[in-house]
Amino acid sequence: MGTDTVRSPAPDEAAGRRREQHGWYVYDWACSVYSTTVVTVFLGPYLTSVAEAAADAEGFVHPLGIPVRAGSFFAYAVSLSVILAVVLMPLVGAAADRTGRKKPLLAAAAYTGAAATAGMFFLAGERYLLGGLLLVVANAAQSVAMMLYNAYLPQIATPEERDAVSSRGWAFGYAAGALVLVANLVLYTAHDSFGVSEGMAVRICLASAGLWWGAFTLVPLRRLRDRRAPAREAGGAVSGFRQLAATLRDMRRHPLTLAFLLAYLVYNDGIQTVISQASLYGSKELGLGQSTLIVAVLLVQVLAVAGALALGRLARTYGAKRTVLGSLVAWTLTLAAGYFLPANAPVWFFVLAAGIGLVLGGSQALSRSLFSHMVPPGKEAEYFSAYELSDRGMSWLGPLLFGLTYQVTGSYRDAILSLVGFFVLGFVLLARVPVRRAIADAGNPVPERI
C-alpha cells in the first residue's frame, strides 16, 4: 500500500539521527548498572540482612508500626516505589509532550535516582528504613527517566530501524552491567585485600552504581535534542491532572494499543519481579553465597547482550510479535524449572541464569519497539508514560504477590512459583492482539514484517 511507504531520509537527516541514536544508547549504558548492581544483585540480600538485624524475636520489623516479616521488606519496598512511579509518570509524560522539553525532565529524574543510589553508601547497621526510602526514591526516579528515554525512540528511529535500535540499546545496557559486575566481583571477593569489610564492599558497590549513572548520563543529555511541541499542545496552562485525563481519553480511541499494553503489563510484571527477587531467592532459599550470585548475574548480563541481538535478528525473519511470544514460552519453562532447583548447587543456578539471560534482553527490547509503532504521532511521551506504567510502573503486583506468598508460607519456592501465571496469561493476551491493524489505527506506516 502506498500509505505504508517510508521515504528515504536525506543524508544530513540520517547522520543527525545516528548521532542521537548513539547518545540514546549511552543512557541505557548509564542506568542499567543500577538495575543490575543494585536491584538484581546486592540490595535485596543486603537490605534483607539489615532488616533482619533490626527485627524482633519473631523476625518482624515494624515500619510505621506495621508488622512486616524482615524477609518481605525488600519486596514491599519495591512495590511502594512502583506505586509512587504510577503517580508521577503520567504527569511528567504529559508535561514533556505539552512543552516539548523532555531533556530537562530526563536530567532531573536521572540525577535524583543517581543521588539516591549513591546515598546507599550510608546503609549500615540497622538502618533498614533508610534503605527502604532510598530504594523507593531511586526506583521511582529510574522509572520516570526510562519513560522519557523510551519516548525518544519514535523520534530518533524510522519504523524500519526501531527493532534494531531498541535491541542495541538493551545490548549497551547489559554490556555495562556486565562490565561493572566484574569490578563488583573483584572488590567483593577480595575485600580483605583492599582493607574493607564485606559490608563496606557491598556499600561501595551500591554507591558506585549511582556515580556511574550520573557520569554517563551527561552523554545523552548532550546528544539528544528536544522537538518543538505542536501548538495545540504547547499553549495554555493545562494542569498535569487535566492533561493526564485528556491522555486517558485519547488512549480509549486506540483500543488495540491498550490491548497490547494490557498484555505487556501482565508478562512484564513477571519479568521485573524475577529480576528484582532472583538474588533473594538464590541467597535465602538455595543457600548460595554472594560471589555465586554475582557470577550468575554476570552470566545473565553477557548472554542478554547476545540474546537481545539474536532475538532482534529473529524478529526480522519471523516478526517481533512471534518472537516475543516464543520468548514468553521460554520464560514460563525457565521459571517453572527454578522451583525445582536443589539448594547449594551453583551449577544448576548458572543453568537457570543462562536461560533467563538468553530471553531477557530480547523480550524487553522487542516489546518496546513493537509498542513504538502503535503510538500516535505527537503523543510519544504521554503514551510511553503509559508504557512505562506497564513496564516498571505497574510492576508492583508481582513483588507484592512474591512478598505476600513468602509472608504466608515462609517459602521462597512457593513465592517464585507464584510468578508463572504472569507469563502464561501474558502470552494469551498478546496472541490476541492484531498488531498490524493496531499500527494502522494509530496512523503509522506498517512495516513489511512485524
Image: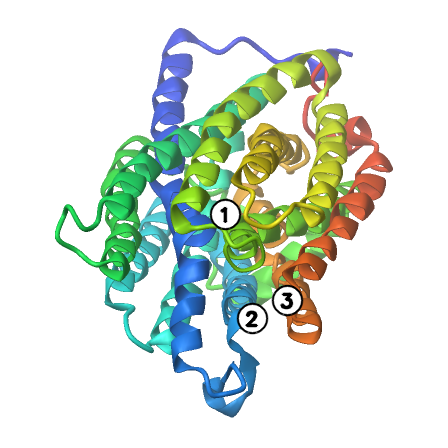
Q: Camera-side residue: 362 or 25?
A: 362
Q: Please identify the quadrant where the C terminus is shown.
A: top right
Q: Is residue 395 left or right of residue 176?
A: right
Label 2: few (<14), some (14–19) or many (≥20) C-alpha neighbours in 10 Å: many
Of all residues shown, which one is farthest toward the bottom? 65
Judged by depth in the image, the label closer to the viewer, 2 or 3, is 2
Residue at the (30%, 45%) spot, across then down: 213
Q: Is residue 183 left or right of residue 425?
A: left
Q: Element at badge 3? A: helix
Res 147 label: 1
Q: Closer to the N terminus: mark 2 or mark 3?
A: 2
Label 3: few (<14), some (14–19) or many (≥20) C-alpha neighbours in 10 Å: some
Residue at the (41%, 21%) spot, across then down: 17
Q: Camera-side residue: 7 or 424?
A: 424
Residue 68 image point, x, y percent: 55, 81
Q: Which residue is mark 2?
A: 72
Q: Camera-side residue: 416 or 152?
A: 416
Q: Is residue 68 above or below residue 213?
A: below
Residue at the (46%, 46%) spot, across then down: 146
Q: Amino acid at mark 1?
A: Met
Residue at the (87%, 37%) spot, across then down: 432
Q: How many marks?
A: 3
Q: Within the image, what quadrant is residue 378 found in?
A: top right
Res 400 label: 3
